[in-house]
Amino acid sequence: MPVHEPLVLMRRASSGLRPPRLEQFARGLRRHVTCGREFQCLITGDAEMQRLNREFRRKDYPTDVLSFPSGPRAHKRKGRAGTPIQLSLGDIAISVDRARAQAREFGHTVDDEICILMLHGVLHLMGMDHERDGGAMARAETEWRRKLRLPSALIERVVGA
């Protein structure tokens, strides 16, 4: 059996998290949502998320999830026999600190919150943008949340607030 690179990287250990469940969820996203396209997810803390948010978005505060798409040319290229090779969609970073606070606020587990954030980030990697798409991302996230048996979706919480 081939050894696979982990999809979820834990920069910071956190009690209550179940890394095998998060890895299994990420593999399910890859199989069902991204149709086999790769991505990686970093689980880190507020300090690193604030640094990344400041560096890449010019916003100096920690945030719950950031997506870093690879760009349109990185999605496919031709292999030796002219067959397409799928490259990474990009990377996601999630704050375990934000996830913990949001899980408490919305009454579910930290693992569930990280899964919600991971789904949200993956949809961004696939080119969706809830700020500009007239609700398409919200509909997709709601549908995937139901299929994946996740609690309230991130966009639904923002819209409902």
Image (tube, rainbow, N blue to C red):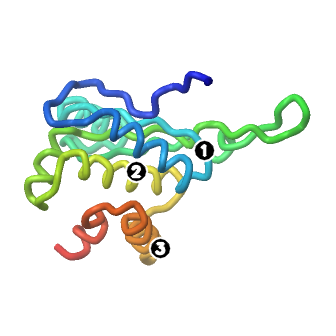
Which residue occupies 44% across, 77% down? 134
State the residue at coordinates (25%, 36%).
18
Side of 105 where 4 appears, left or right: right
Q: Is residue 97 above or below residue 29?
A: above
Q: Which residue is mark 2?
A: 121
Q: Which residue is mark 3?
A: 136
Does residue 161 appear left or right of residue 149 in this picture?
A: left
Out of 109 and 44, give the one closest to the viewer: 109
The secondary element bearing badge 3 is classed as helix
151 displayed left or right of 131: left
Taking the image as shown, residue 156 lies to the left or right of residue 34, namely left
Whole-percent x and y of residue 92? 40, 40
From this viewpoint, which residue is outermost toward the front?
A: 1
Name which residue type carries label 1: Arg
**Residue for badge 1:** 37
Q: Earlier in the sequence, mark 2 or mark 1?
A: 1
Q: Nearer the viewer, residue 87 or 145?
A: 145
